[in-house]
Amino acid sequence: MLTVESIDLHYGAAQALRQVSVGAERGKITCVLGRNGVGKSSLLRAIVGHQPVSSGRILFEGQDITRMRAHERARRGIAYVPQGREIFPLLTVRENLETGYARLPADKRKISEELFELFPVLKSMLARRGGDLSGGQQQQLAIARALVMEPQLLVLDEPTEGIQPSIIKDIGRAITYLRGQGRMAILLVEQYFDFARALADKYAVMERGEVVLGGEGSSMVESDVRRYLTV
């Protein structure tokens, strides 16, 4: 579904990514781990088209999308849940969800009941403004908004950041359910080791803009990974 091949990324003279390669497969979860500032979010921004790469290739369903603009990638089925959620605070929950309609044909522009089964709290808050929700509720809204797009690839940037434990469990169950449906590939950036280990089919650990460790989730060695997560 997604293949990132040896990409470099620069912000001016500063190099954020060095020869980074990762992949994501339909029906599986790839987790990218690492401390703050090692390039995880830059990798996701490159994948969704928010930041151009300096070299390397990004392939989606076999097609080179390296130079494709962000909205074109979204129309092809790449949905992004950014760090910090970035919901629209003055729009209602319903209106936030409806912004996900943009890539869909008119006859498919509806909010699936499946979303409310995943995140029941949203159904009771459809008329409330997004900015009035708690941080955990906003995170659920951000994920649901991405799912309205019916994505082929769901890209999540630290969905557990600043979230209470009970909602972290709800988000974990939702991601597990989505994997089980087999309709999409999921790429997840995370710092919370236990959350990542519970979900990862494949993993990659980043340090200073490079992938330094990776493999099958079942072969993840806690001590090896945690030394790249601790400060």
Image (cartoon, rainbow, N blue to C red):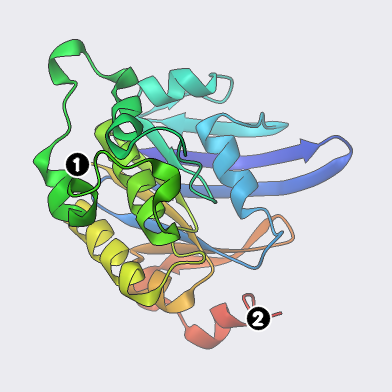
Q: Which residue occupies 64% across, 34% down?
A: 56
Q: Do the residues labelled 1 and 2 touch (CB within 8 Å)?
A: no
- Which image quarter: residue 160? bottom left
Q: Where is residue 192 in the image (x, y as percent from the top left)?
A: 49, 73
The residue that disc 1 covers is: 183
Vertical relation: 45 (above or below) 28 = above
Q: What residue type is labelled 2?
A: Thr
Task: Give the total number of marks visible in the rendering.
Answer: 2
Q: Is residue 144 visible?
A: yes
Vertical relation: 120 (above or below) 10 = below
Q: Which residue occupies 41% across, 58% down?
A: 134
Q: Which of 100 and 183 is in front in this view?
A: 100
Direction right: furthest residue: 13
The residue that disc 2 covers is: 230
Q: Which of 197 and 54 is in front in this view?
A: 197
In the rendered structure, which disc, 1 or 2, sits on the residue that comes first in sequence? 1
Q: Which of 114 and 203 is in front in this view?
A: 114
- Which image quarter: residue 203? bottom left
Q: Label 1's element?
A: loop
